[in-house]
Image (tube, rainbow, N blue to C red):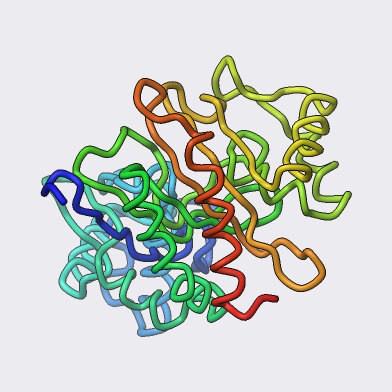
Amino acid sequence: MPASNTATVAHAAPPPLAGAVRGPTPAGPPADGADADLPASGSVGKALAVLGAFTPEQPSLGVSEVARRAHMPKSTVHRLLAALVDGGLIAKSGTQYSPGPLLTELAALTNRPDLQRLREAALPYLLDLYEHAHEMVHLAVLEGIDVRYVEKIYGHERARCPSRVGGHVPAAASALGKAMLAFSDTETVVRASRRLRPLTPYTIVTPHALAAELRAVRERHVAYDRQENTLGLTCVAAPILGWRGRVVAAVSVSGPVHRFRPASCATAVRNAAAGIAKQAHLL
């Protein structure tokens, strides 16, 4: 296979830092340098507040913005960031800071065991899908009414796609999400129908249109995204079903509209979903 088609596996990332435990939040930032000698417990709490300043939407921040979000003076934040950089929890590039590599390693130890087992069972099938299509392959689960990416495989010539392992997108605006919503409970579908918003001119924005789409997905066991999430990208996905048809996850192949015909991969994606379910002992 040509070097340009070599697949890359995007390993599981830590959960979004926005949910990290935050330290005590004072009414306003203290005077600069007011807490030069922090007790151990205070230092830990403030370090957690610094980590919690980073979000999936803004993973790279300067010292001033971290200080504002953490409600601490810049001098304290600068010192904490330096210590976190030394420990690998934060990475520094110029004047910008972002979550560091050690967080990914720690997440691998504490990540949800069910997702770890799912990833291990799915990986051979995801690689098979990549070999079949030479386009981007995703594995995802449903969290509330959002899709959470669990795995991503791509080559050197991958299409520009905003997805990232650990990231979220609205379920109703993606093939992965629609594949899972079609086999979800009524309450989840109703919640998704109430939160429809246009991401592109092609996004489904009415409950009636979503209901019709989900009926079609249940009939064919495959869902399509026709530039509904990202302009220029199209996708085909299939649900991974467990005992009594309970939806567990979904798998997809995505590519640019000018070269990828999603219907050509529908059977392969369905077969991969069935194989993952069997390999993961979901059936």
Residue, x 60% and y 63% (percent of image)?
274
Quadrant the C terminus occupies: bottom right
Q: Is residue 232 above or below residue 13?
A: above
What is the count of numbered marks?
0
Q: Residue furthest right?
A: 186
Q: Is residue 5 left or right of residue 23?
A: left
The picture quadrant where one finds residue 90 is bottom left
Q: Position of residue 280 (x, y in %)?
A: 57, 77
The picture quadrant where one finds residue 213 is top right
Q: Position of residue 210 (x, y in %)?
A: 77, 31
Q: Is residue 79 above or below residue 163?
A: below
Front position in the image: 101 or 201: 201
Front position in the image: 77 or 196: 196
Q: Position of residue 93 (x, y in %)?
A: 14, 49
Q: Is residue 142 above or below residue 204?
A: below
Q: Is residue 193 above or below residue 97?
A: above
Q: Position of residue 217 (x, y in %)?
A: 73, 41
Residue, x 53% and y 54% (percent of image)?
251
Residue, x 20% and y 47% (percent of image)?
5
Q: Residue furthest top?
A: 201
Residue, x 71% and y 70% (percent of image)?
242
Front position in the image: 36 or 179: 179
Q: Is residue 189 left or right of residue 263?
A: right
